[in-house]
Amino acid sequence: MKEGPDIAHIAALIGDPARANMLTALMSGKALTATELATEAGITVQTASTHLAKLAEGGLVETRKQGRHKYSSLANDDIATLLENLMGVAAKTGHLRTRTGPKDAALRKARVCYNHLAGDMGTQMYDSLRARDMLHHSGETLHLSPTGESFVTALGIDLPHLQHQRAPLCRDCLDWSERRSHLAGSLGRALLSRFIELGWAKPVADSRVIRFSSLGSTEFAKHFPL
Amino acid sequence: MKEGPDIAHIAALIGDPARANMLTALMSGKALTATELATEAGITVQTASTHLAKLAEGGLVETRKQGRHKYSSLANDDIATLLENLMGVAAKTGHLRTRTGPKDAALRKARVCYNHLAGDMGTQMYDSLRARDMLHHSGETLHLSPTGESFVTALGIDLPHLQHQRAPLCRDCLDWSERRSHLAGSLGRALLSRFIELGWAKPVADSRVIRFSSLGSTEFAKHFPL
DNA sequence: CCAACGCTTCGATTACGGTCGAACTATGAA
DNA sequence: TTCATAGTTCGACCGTAATCGAAGCGTTGG
Protein backbone atom coordinates (compact mmCIF):
# COMPACT_ATOMS: atom_id res chain seq x y z
CA MET A 1 0.00 0.00 0.00
CA LYS A 2 2.83 2.37 0.71
CA GLU A 3 5.57 0.89 -1.37
CA GLY A 4 6.94 2.14 -4.61
CA PRO A 5 6.98 5.44 -6.39
CA ASP A 6 4.10 7.88 -6.54
CA ILE A 7 2.52 7.08 -9.85
CA ALA A 8 -0.71 8.89 -9.01
CA HIS A 9 1.00 12.25 -8.97
CA ILE A 10 2.46 12.12 -12.44
CA ALA A 11 -0.52 10.29 -13.88
CA ALA A 12 -2.70 13.07 -12.56
CA LEU A 13 -0.44 15.55 -14.28
CA ILE A 14 -1.07 13.83 -17.60
CA GLY A 15 -4.69 13.25 -16.71
CA ASP A 16 -5.88 16.80 -17.26
CA PRO A 17 -7.11 17.33 -20.85
CA ALA A 18 -5.37 20.67 -21.26
CA ARG A 19 -2.04 19.31 -20.04
CA ALA A 20 -2.43 16.16 -22.12
CA ASN A 21 -2.90 18.31 -25.19
CA MET A 22 0.23 20.26 -24.40
CA LEU A 23 2.24 17.11 -23.87
CA THR A 24 1.10 15.53 -27.11
CA ALA A 25 2.00 18.76 -28.85
CA LEU A 26 5.47 18.48 -27.36
CA MET A 27 5.75 14.97 -28.75
CA SER A 28 6.72 16.67 -31.99
CA GLY A 29 10.09 17.14 -30.33
CA LYS A 30 10.13 20.85 -30.93
CA ALA A 31 10.34 23.19 -27.96
CA LEU A 32 7.24 25.36 -27.86
CA THR A 33 6.50 28.66 -26.18
CA ALA A 34 3.79 29.12 -23.59
CA THR A 35 1.43 30.90 -25.97
CA GLU A 36 1.86 28.25 -28.65
CA LEU A 37 1.01 25.60 -26.11
CA ALA A 38 -1.94 27.61 -24.90
CA THR A 39 -3.51 27.84 -28.34
CA GLU A 40 -2.67 24.21 -28.93
CA ALA A 41 -4.63 23.24 -25.85
CA GLY A 42 -7.40 25.75 -26.38
CA ILE A 43 -6.88 27.65 -23.13
CA THR A 44 -5.69 31.09 -22.13
CA VAL A 45 -2.07 31.91 -21.49
CA GLN A 46 -2.52 32.27 -17.77
CA THR A 47 -3.80 28.75 -17.24
CA ALA A 48 -1.14 27.41 -19.58
CA SER A 49 1.45 29.10 -17.43
CA THR A 50 0.23 27.45 -14.26
CA HIS A 51 0.04 24.12 -16.04
CA LEU A 52 3.58 24.46 -17.28
CA ALA A 53 4.77 25.23 -13.78
CA LYS A 54 3.19 22.05 -12.52
CA LEU A 55 4.56 19.97 -15.36
CA ALA A 56 8.04 21.33 -14.74
CA GLU A 57 7.78 20.71 -11.03
CA GLY A 58 6.70 17.18 -11.78
CA GLY A 59 9.74 16.65 -13.97
CA LEU A 60 7.77 16.02 -17.14
CA VAL A 61 8.92 19.04 -19.07
CA GLU A 62 12.01 21.21 -19.04
CA THR A 63 11.95 24.91 -19.68
CA ARG A 64 14.56 27.20 -21.11
CA LYS A 65 14.35 30.95 -21.20
CA GLN A 66 15.43 32.77 -24.32
CA GLY A 67 14.80 36.45 -24.36
CA ARG A 68 11.23 37.05 -23.51
CA HIS A 69 10.20 33.60 -24.66
CA LYS A 70 10.11 30.51 -22.56
CA TYR A 71 10.53 27.32 -24.46
CA SER A 72 9.22 24.08 -23.02
CA SER A 73 10.06 20.59 -24.14
CA LEU A 74 9.68 17.09 -22.82
CA ALA A 75 12.21 16.43 -20.09
CA ASN A 76 13.68 13.26 -21.60
CA ASP A 77 13.05 10.25 -23.80
CA ASP A 78 11.45 8.32 -20.98
CA ILE A 79 8.58 10.76 -20.91
CA ALA A 80 8.08 10.37 -24.65
CA THR A 81 8.09 6.61 -24.31
CA LEU A 82 5.58 6.80 -21.50
CA LEU A 83 3.27 8.97 -23.57
CA GLU A 84 3.51 6.65 -26.55
CA ASN A 85 2.75 3.80 -24.21
CA LEU A 86 -0.31 5.63 -22.96
CA MET A 87 -1.49 6.25 -26.51
CA GLY A 88 -1.08 2.56 -27.14
CA VAL A 89 -3.43 1.40 -24.43
CA ALA A 90 -5.80 4.29 -25.10
CA ALA A 91 -6.00 3.26 -28.73
CA LYS A 92 -6.40 -0.38 -27.84
CA THR A 93 -9.16 0.14 -25.32
CA GLY A 94 -10.98 1.99 -28.07
CA HIS A 95 -11.01 5.35 -26.41
CA LEU A 96 -10.21 7.48 -29.40
CA ARG A 97 -10.94 11.13 -29.22
CA THR A 98 -11.72 11.48 -32.86
CA ARG A 99 -12.75 9.00 -35.49
CA THR A 100 -9.80 7.92 -37.57
CA GLY A 101 -9.61 10.70 -40.12
CA PRO A 102 -7.61 11.13 -43.30
CA LYS A 103 -4.72 12.46 -41.26
CA ASP A 104 -4.33 9.15 -39.48
CA ALA A 105 -2.93 7.31 -42.46
CA ALA A 106 -0.11 9.83 -42.73
CA LEU A 107 0.49 9.60 -39.00
CA ARG A 108 0.72 5.86 -39.20
CA LYS A 109 3.11 6.00 -42.15
CA ALA A 110 5.73 8.35 -40.77
CA ARG A 111 5.69 10.65 -37.82
CA VAL A 112 8.10 12.09 -35.33
CA CYS A 113 8.17 10.53 -31.86
CA TYR A 114 9.76 13.15 -29.64
CA ASN A 115 12.67 13.62 -32.00
CA HIS A 116 13.13 10.46 -33.99
CA LEU A 117 11.28 8.66 -36.76
CA ALA A 118 8.27 6.53 -35.84
CA GLY A 119 5.44 4.85 -37.71
CA ASP A 120 5.75 2.40 -40.58
CA MET A 121 8.97 3.86 -41.86
CA GLY A 122 10.46 4.03 -38.40
CA THR A 123 9.93 0.35 -37.78
CA GLN A 124 11.14 -0.44 -41.28
CA MET A 125 14.40 1.35 -40.63
CA TYR A 126 14.80 -0.44 -37.32
CA ASP A 127 14.04 -3.86 -38.77
CA SER A 128 16.31 -3.29 -41.73
CA LEU A 129 19.25 -2.38 -39.50
CA ARG A 130 18.55 -5.35 -37.26
CA ALA A 131 18.25 -7.78 -40.17
CA ARG A 132 21.64 -6.74 -41.49
CA ASP A 133 23.25 -7.07 -38.05
CA MET A 134 24.09 -3.39 -37.91
CA LEU A 135 22.09 -3.04 -34.74
CA HIS A 136 22.78 -5.44 -31.93
CA HIS A 137 20.73 -6.28 -28.90
CA SER A 138 22.80 -7.33 -25.88
CA GLY A 139 20.85 -7.41 -22.69
CA GLU A 140 18.68 -4.36 -22.73
CA THR A 141 21.07 -2.00 -24.43
CA LEU A 142 21.26 -1.59 -28.17
CA HIS A 143 24.67 -1.46 -29.80
CA LEU A 144 25.86 -0.40 -33.22
CA SER A 145 28.07 -3.02 -34.88
CA PRO A 146 31.23 -2.00 -36.82
CA THR A 147 29.40 -2.43 -40.13
CA GLY A 148 26.61 -0.32 -38.72
CA GLU A 149 29.05 2.37 -37.72
CA SER A 150 30.51 2.67 -41.19
CA PHE A 151 27.02 2.58 -42.68
CA VAL A 152 25.70 5.57 -40.72
CA THR A 153 28.98 7.42 -41.22
CA ALA A 154 28.55 6.96 -44.96
CA LEU A 155 25.12 8.49 -44.56
CA GLY A 156 26.76 11.57 -43.14
CA ILE A 157 26.32 11.07 -39.43
CA ASP A 158 29.04 12.53 -37.20
CA LEU A 159 29.34 9.46 -35.02
CA PRO A 160 32.26 10.53 -32.77
CA HIS A 161 30.37 13.66 -31.88
CA LEU A 162 27.32 11.66 -30.84
CA GLN A 163 29.38 9.24 -28.79
CA HIS A 164 30.78 12.14 -26.83
CA GLN A 165 27.38 13.02 -25.47
CA ARG A 166 26.00 11.76 -22.23
CA ALA A 167 22.78 10.50 -23.77
CA PRO A 168 22.62 6.87 -24.92
CA LEU A 169 23.38 6.38 -28.60
CA CYS A 170 20.79 3.74 -29.36
CA ARG A 171 17.53 3.00 -27.65
CA ASP A 172 14.41 1.27 -28.79
CA CYS A 173 11.04 2.89 -28.43
CA LEU A 174 7.69 1.16 -28.75
CA ASP A 175 5.13 2.38 -31.20
CA TRP A 176 1.42 2.73 -30.58
CA SER A 177 0.15 2.35 -34.15
CA GLU A 178 2.51 -0.43 -35.04
CA ARG A 179 3.16 -2.50 -31.97
CA ARG A 180 6.83 -2.67 -32.73
CA SER A 181 10.12 -1.05 -31.90
CA HIS A 182 11.84 1.74 -33.68
CA LEU A 183 15.17 3.44 -33.15
CA ALA A 184 15.40 6.18 -30.55
CA GLY A 185 18.41 7.65 -28.77
CA SER A 186 20.79 10.24 -30.09
CA LEU A 187 21.42 8.20 -33.24
CA GLY A 188 17.71 8.03 -33.99
CA ARG A 189 17.48 11.77 -33.59
CA ALA A 190 20.56 12.36 -35.76
CA LEU A 191 19.25 10.11 -38.53
CA LEU A 192 15.94 11.92 -38.76
CA SER A 193 17.54 15.34 -38.89
CA ARG A 194 19.94 14.02 -41.52
CA PHE A 195 16.99 12.87 -43.66
CA ILE A 196 15.55 16.35 -43.44
CA GLU A 197 18.93 17.86 -44.19
CA LEU A 198 19.25 15.71 -47.29
CA GLY A 199 15.84 16.84 -48.46
CA TRP A 200 14.41 13.33 -48.20
CA ALA A 201 11.76 14.32 -45.71
CA LYS A 202 10.07 17.35 -44.26
CA PRO A 203 8.01 17.78 -41.11
CA VAL A 204 4.48 19.00 -41.79
CA ALA A 205 3.75 22.20 -39.87
CA ASP A 206 1.64 21.97 -36.73
CA SER A 207 1.62 18.21 -36.79
CA ARG A 208 3.72 15.20 -36.02
CA VAL A 209 3.50 13.98 -39.60
CA ILE A 210 6.69 13.58 -41.63
CA ARG A 211 6.26 13.80 -45.37
CA PHE A 212 8.82 12.04 -47.57
CA SER A 213 9.50 13.39 -51.04
CA SER A 214 9.45 10.95 -53.94
CA LEU A 215 13.23 11.13 -54.08
CA GLY A 216 13.37 10.59 -50.33
CA SER A 217 11.12 7.54 -50.50
CA THR A 218 13.22 5.79 -53.08
CA GLU A 219 16.47 6.70 -51.32
CA PHE A 220 15.04 5.50 -48.02
CA ALA A 221 13.92 2.22 -49.58
CA LYS A 222 17.36 1.80 -51.11
CA HIS A 223 19.21 2.38 -47.85
CA PHE A 224 16.82 0.49 -45.60
CA PRO A 225 15.54 -2.56 -47.51
CA LEU A 226 13.68 -5.29 -45.72
CA MET B 1 -4.73 19.20 -31.03
CA LYS B 2 -7.37 16.68 -31.92
CA GLU B 3 -5.30 13.83 -33.23
CA GLY B 4 -4.51 10.59 -31.60
CA PRO B 5 -6.03 8.61 -28.79
CA ASP B 6 -7.43 10.06 -25.61
CA ILE B 7 -4.58 9.70 -23.20
CA ALA B 8 -6.03 12.16 -20.72
CA HIS B 9 -8.93 9.89 -19.91
CA ILE B 10 -6.95 6.86 -18.89
CA ALA B 11 -4.20 8.92 -17.28
CA ALA B 12 -6.87 10.56 -15.17
CA LEU B 13 -8.09 7.13 -14.18
CA ILE B 14 -4.64 6.27 -12.87
CA GLY B 15 -4.19 9.74 -11.47
CA ASP B 16 -6.46 9.36 -8.49
CA PRO B 17 -4.51 8.19 -5.43
CA ALA B 18 -7.09 5.64 -4.39
CA ARG B 19 -7.27 4.10 -7.83
CA ALA B 20 -3.49 4.16 -8.18
CA ASN B 21 -3.21 2.21 -4.96
CA MET B 22 -5.67 -0.36 -6.20
CA LEU B 23 -3.84 -0.72 -9.49
CA THR B 24 -0.46 -1.19 -7.86
CA ALA B 25 -2.05 -3.77 -5.60
CA LEU B 26 -3.26 -5.58 -8.70
CA MET B 27 0.30 -5.57 -10.05
CA SER B 28 0.79 -8.63 -7.87
CA GLY B 29 -1.09 -10.46 -10.59
CA LYS B 30 -3.60 -11.86 -8.18
CA ALA B 31 -7.27 -11.09 -8.69
CA LEU B 32 -8.56 -9.23 -5.66
CA THR B 33 -12.03 -8.66 -4.29
CA ALA B 34 -13.56 -5.24 -3.87
CA THR B 35 -13.16 -5.24 -0.10
CA GLU B 36 -9.53 -6.28 -0.33
CA LEU B 37 -8.87 -3.45 -2.73
CA ALA B 38 -10.75 -1.06 -0.49
CA THR B 39 -8.59 -1.83 2.54
CA GLU B 40 -5.53 -1.74 0.31
CA ALA B 41 -6.38 1.77 -0.78
CA GLY B 42 -7.59 2.93 2.60
CA ILE B 43 -11.14 3.76 1.54
CA THR B 44 -14.59 2.36 2.17
CA VAL B 45 -16.14 -0.34 0.07
CA GLN B 46 -18.65 1.97 -1.56
CA THR B 47 -16.08 4.27 -3.06
CA ALA B 48 -13.97 1.31 -4.10
CA SER B 49 -16.98 -0.02 -5.94
CA THR B 50 -17.46 3.16 -7.93
CA HIS B 51 -13.75 3.29 -8.66
CA LEU B 52 -13.76 -0.26 -9.93
CA ALA B 53 -16.69 0.52 -12.19
CA LYS B 54 -14.75 3.38 -13.73
CA LEU B 55 -11.60 1.35 -14.12
CA ALA B 56 -13.54 -1.43 -15.81
CA GLU B 57 -15.29 1.00 -18.10
CA GLY B 58 -11.92 2.45 -19.01
CA GLY B 59 -10.61 -0.98 -19.90
CA LEU B 60 -7.90 -1.01 -17.26
CA VAL B 61 -9.25 -3.86 -15.17
CA GLU B 62 -11.41 -6.87 -15.87
CA THR B 63 -13.89 -8.24 -13.40
CA ARG B 64 -15.19 -11.71 -12.88
CA LYS B 65 -18.04 -12.65 -10.61
CA GLN B 66 -17.72 -15.74 -8.50
CA GLY B 67 -20.48 -16.34 -6.06
CA ARG B 68 -20.87 -13.27 -3.96
CA HIS B 69 -17.36 -12.15 -4.62
CA LYS B 70 -16.24 -10.00 -7.51
CA TYR B 71 -12.64 -10.46 -8.48
CA SER B 72 -10.82 -7.72 -10.30
CA SER B 73 -7.53 -7.99 -12.13
CA LEU B 74 -5.55 -5.95 -14.61
CA ALA B 75 -7.07 -6.23 -18.07
CA ASN B 76 -3.90 -7.31 -19.85
CA ASP B 77 -0.13 -7.18 -19.90
CA ASP B 78 -0.08 -3.81 -21.61
CA ILE B 79 -1.62 -2.22 -18.55
CA ALA B 80 1.02 -3.78 -16.34
CA THR B 81 3.76 -2.54 -18.64
CA LEU B 82 2.27 0.91 -18.60
CA LEU B 83 2.16 0.95 -14.81
CA GLU B 84 5.76 -0.23 -14.56
CA ASN B 85 6.68 2.49 -17.00
CA LEU B 86 4.94 5.05 -14.85
CA MET B 87 6.78 3.81 -11.77
CA GLY B 88 9.98 4.21 -13.71
CA VAL B 89 9.57 7.89 -14.46
CA ALA B 90 8.07 8.53 -11.04
CA ALA B 91 11.11 6.98 -9.43
CA LYS B 92 13.48 8.82 -11.73
CA THR B 93 11.93 12.21 -11.20
CA GLY B 94 12.43 11.61 -7.51
CA HIS B 95 8.81 11.57 -6.55
CA LEU B 96 8.90 8.71 -4.15
CA ARG B 97 6.05 8.39 -1.76
CA THR B 98 8.12 6.85 0.97
CA ARG B 99 11.79 6.84 1.64
CA THR B 100 13.45 3.66 0.46
CA GLY B 101 12.83 1.27 3.31
CA PRO B 102 14.20 -2.15 4.12
CA LYS B 103 11.51 -3.69 1.95
CA ASP B 104 12.92 -2.05 -1.13
CA ALA B 105 15.95 -4.29 -1.36
CA ALA B 106 13.74 -7.36 -1.49
CA LEU B 107 11.54 -5.67 -4.09
CA ARG B 108 14.54 -4.94 -6.22
CA LYS B 109 15.85 -8.48 -5.93
CA ALA B 110 12.76 -10.41 -6.98
CA ARG B 111 9.18 -9.37 -7.33
CA VAL B 112 6.17 -10.28 -9.35
CA CYS B 113 5.27 -7.97 -12.23
CA TYR B 114 1.63 -8.66 -13.01
CA ASN B 115 2.22 -12.41 -13.15
CA HIS B 116 5.82 -13.00 -14.05
CA LEU B 117 9.20 -12.60 -12.42
CA ALA B 118 10.77 -9.15 -12.32
CA GLY B 119 13.66 -7.50 -10.52
CA ASP B 120 17.28 -8.67 -10.48
CA MET B 121 16.40 -12.31 -10.86
CA GLY B 122 13.92 -11.59 -13.62
CA THR B 123 16.49 -9.81 -15.72
CA GLN B 124 19.05 -12.49 -14.92
CA MET B 125 16.73 -15.16 -16.25
CA TYR B 126 16.06 -13.13 -19.35
CA ASP B 127 19.70 -12.41 -20.02
CA SER B 128 20.72 -15.99 -19.41
CA LEU B 129 18.18 -17.29 -21.91
CA ARG B 130 19.24 -14.70 -24.43
CA ALA B 131 22.94 -15.39 -24.01
CA ARG B 132 22.40 -19.08 -24.71
CA ASP B 133 20.30 -18.34 -27.80
CA MET B 134 17.25 -19.93 -26.29
CA LEU B 135 15.35 -16.70 -26.69
CA HIS B 136 15.40 -15.04 -30.05
CA HIS B 137 14.51 -11.50 -31.01
CA SER B 138 13.17 -11.15 -34.56
CA GLY B 139 11.61 -7.81 -35.27
CA GLU B 140 9.59 -6.98 -32.20
CA THR B 141 8.40 -10.46 -31.33
CA LEU B 142 10.34 -12.79 -29.09
CA HIS B 143 10.69 -16.41 -30.12
CA LEU B 144 11.77 -19.54 -28.34
CA SER B 145 14.46 -21.45 -30.19
CA PRO B 146 14.34 -25.27 -30.43
CA THR B 147 16.98 -25.57 -27.70
CA GLY B 148 14.92 -23.20 -25.63
CA GLU B 149 11.83 -25.29 -26.15
CA SER B 150 13.50 -28.45 -24.91
CA PHE B 151 15.01 -26.52 -22.01
CA VAL B 152 11.72 -25.24 -20.64
CA THR B 153 10.05 -28.59 -21.29
CA ALA B 154 12.75 -30.20 -19.17
CA LEU B 155 11.88 -27.73 -16.46
CA GLY B 156 8.35 -29.08 -16.50
CA ILE B 157 6.55 -26.52 -18.61
CA ASP B 158 3.63 -27.79 -20.67
CA LEU B 159 4.63 -25.97 -23.83
CA PRO B 160 1.99 -27.30 -26.25
CA HIS B 161 -0.70 -26.19 -23.85
CA LEU B 162 0.71 -22.66 -23.74
CA GLN B 163 1.02 -22.49 -27.51
CA HIS B 164 -2.65 -23.31 -27.82
CA GLN B 165 -3.60 -20.10 -26.03
CA ARG B 166 -4.37 -16.89 -27.80
CA ALA B 167 -1.96 -14.87 -25.66
CA PRO B 168 1.60 -14.37 -26.96
CA LEU B 169 4.10 -16.88 -25.62
CA CYS B 170 7.02 -14.53 -25.11
CA ARG B 171 7.08 -10.82 -24.52
CA ASP B 172 9.59 -8.55 -22.96
CA CYS B 173 8.67 -6.16 -20.21
CA LEU B 174 10.70 -3.25 -18.98
CA ASP B 175 11.67 -2.93 -15.35
CA TRP B 176 11.59 0.22 -13.29
CA SER B 177 14.25 -0.65 -10.71
CA GLU B 178 16.59 -2.24 -13.19
CA ARG B 179 16.21 -0.47 -16.49
CA ARG B 180 16.22 -3.71 -18.38
CA SER B 181 13.96 -6.27 -19.93
CA HIS B 182 12.61 -9.40 -18.38
CA LEU B 183 10.44 -12.17 -19.75
CA ALA B 184 6.69 -11.66 -19.82
CA GLY B 185 3.99 -13.43 -21.79
CA SER B 186 2.40 -16.75 -21.03
CA LEU B 187 5.81 -18.42 -20.78
CA GLY B 188 6.96 -15.88 -18.22
CA ARG B 189 3.87 -16.55 -16.19
CA ALA B 190 4.25 -20.31 -16.50
CA LEU B 191 7.88 -20.22 -15.41
CA LEU B 192 7.12 -18.26 -12.27
CA SER B 193 4.30 -20.53 -11.24
CA ARG B 194 6.56 -23.50 -11.94
CA PHE B 195 9.22 -22.07 -9.60
CA ILE B 196 6.59 -21.79 -6.89
CA GLU B 197 5.34 -25.28 -7.68
CA LEU B 198 8.85 -26.65 -7.33
CA GLY B 199 9.24 -24.95 -3.96
CA TRP B 200 12.03 -22.74 -5.22
CA ALA B 201 10.17 -19.54 -4.46
CA LYS B 202 7.21 -18.25 -2.56
CA PRO B 203 5.28 -15.00 -2.84
CA VAL B 204 5.30 -12.96 0.35
CA ALA B 205 1.78 -12.23 1.53
CA ASP B 206 0.37 -8.76 0.90
CA SER B 207 3.32 -7.70 -1.16
CA ARG B 208 4.86 -8.09 -4.58
CA VAL B 209 8.04 -9.58 -3.11
CA ILE B 210 9.08 -13.08 -4.13
CA ARG B 211 11.25 -14.91 -1.63
CA PHE B 212 13.54 -17.64 -2.94
CA SER B 213 14.48 -20.50 -0.64
CA SER B 214 18.15 -21.39 -0.34
CA LEU B 215 17.50 -24.48 -2.45
CA GLY B 216 15.63 -22.34 -4.92
CA SER B 217 18.45 -19.84 -5.22
CA THR B 218 21.05 -22.45 -6.02
CA GLU B 219 18.75 -24.23 -8.45
CA PHE B 220 17.90 -20.95 -10.12
CA ALA B 221 21.58 -20.03 -10.43
CA LYS B 222 22.29 -23.46 -11.88
CA HIS B 223 19.56 -23.24 -14.51
CA PHE B 224 20.04 -19.59 -15.39
CA PRO B 225 23.78 -18.82 -15.29
CA LEU B 226 25.07 -15.59 -16.72
C1' DC C 1 -36.65 -19.03 5.67
C1' DC C 2 -33.64 -16.07 7.99
C1' DA C 3 -29.25 -14.00 8.96
C1' DA C 4 -24.71 -12.75 7.50
C1' DC C 5 -21.94 -11.15 3.99
C1' DG C 6 -20.31 -8.83 -0.38
C1' DC C 7 -21.29 -5.46 -3.30
C1' DT C 8 -23.97 -1.68 -5.57
C1' DT C 9 -26.84 2.47 -5.88
C1' DC C 10 -28.47 6.83 -4.15
C1' DG C 11 -28.00 11.22 -2.11
C1' DA C 12 -25.65 14.85 0.20
C1' DT C 13 -21.49 16.88 1.45
C1' DT C 14 -17.11 18.59 0.63
C1' DA C 15 -12.87 19.90 -1.29
C1' DC C 16 -9.70 20.30 -4.71
C1' DG C 17 -8.29 22.09 -8.94
C1' DG C 18 -9.08 24.22 -13.48
C1' DT C 19 -10.38 28.48 -15.42
C1' DC C 20 -10.14 33.32 -16.60
C1' DG C 21 -10.06 38.59 -15.70
C1' DA C 22 -7.07 41.89 -13.97
C1' DA C 23 -2.97 43.61 -12.44
C1' DC C 24 2.08 43.08 -12.42
C1' DT C 25 6.98 42.05 -14.14
C1' DA C 26 10.42 41.55 -17.67
C1' DT C 27 12.26 41.74 -22.13
C1' DG C 28 12.72 43.74 -26.62
C1' DA C 29 11.71 47.32 -30.12
C1' DA C 30 10.94 52.13 -31.65
C1' DT D 1 11.55 56.93 -22.52
C1' DT D 2 7.63 54.81 -24.19
C1' DC D 3 5.12 51.19 -26.08
C1' DA D 4 4.20 46.36 -27.21
C1' DT D 5 4.69 41.65 -26.32
C1' DA D 6 5.53 37.33 -23.35
C1' DG D 7 4.84 35.46 -19.23
C1' DT D 8 3.57 35.30 -14.17
C1' DT D 9 0.83 36.04 -9.97
C1' DC D 10 -3.42 36.96 -7.57
C1' DG D 11 -8.12 36.42 -6.59
C1' DA D 12 -12.52 34.80 -7.28
C1' DC D 13 -15.61 31.67 -9.40
C1' DC D 14 -17.24 27.38 -10.67
C1' DG D 15 -17.68 22.44 -11.71
C1' DT D 16 -16.43 18.09 -11.16
C1' DA D 17 -15.43 14.21 -8.73
C1' DA D 18 -14.10 11.86 -4.47
C1' DT D 19 -16.04 10.46 -0.27
C1' DC D 20 -19.11 8.22 3.00
C1' DG D 21 -23.78 7.07 5.43
C1' DA D 22 -27.79 4.70 4.50
C1' DA D 23 -30.55 1.78 2.07
C1' DG D 24 -31.17 -1.87 -1.39
C1' DC D 25 -29.93 -6.40 -3.84
C1' DG D 26 -28.01 -11.11 -4.50
C1' DT D 27 -25.69 -14.91 -2.81
C1' DT D 28 -24.30 -18.17 0.65
C1' DG D 29 -24.82 -20.91 4.69
C1' DG D 30 -27.19 -22.53 8.35
Image (cartoon, coloured by chain):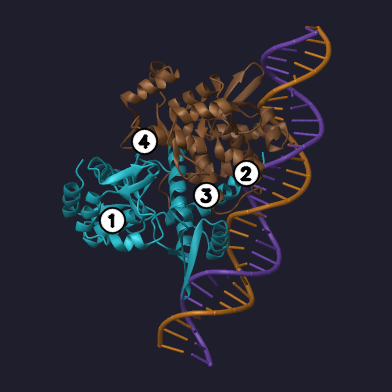
Chain colours: A brown, B cyan, C purple, D orange
Q: Which residue is mark 2?
A: A16
x%, y% of residue B3? Answer: 64, 41
Tags 3 and 1 touching, CB below 8 Å? no
What type is the residue that disc 1 sits on?
Answer: Leu
Amino acid at dot 3: Val
How far apart marks 3 and 1 lie (CA) works out to: 26 Å
Counting residues from the N terminus, which is met first, the one under dot 4 or under dot 2?
2
Q: How far apart, in angstroms, are the residues tagged by discs 2 and 3?
A: 17 Å
Q: Quadrant of residue B226?
A: top left
Instruction: Please state which of the two labelled residues, at mark 2 or mark 3, is closer to the viewer.
Output: 3
- Spatial CA distance of label 3 from label 4 is 28 Å
Between label 4 and label 2, give the one nearer the viewer.
4
SS at mark 1 in the image: helix
> Looking at the rendered structure, which numbered label has been put on residue A94?
none
Q: Identify residue for label 4.
A: A131
Query: Looking at the image, is mark 2 or mark 3 earlier in the sequence?
Result: 2
Image location of residue A118, percent across then percent down: 51, 35
- Circles 1 and 2: CB atoms closer than 8 Å: no
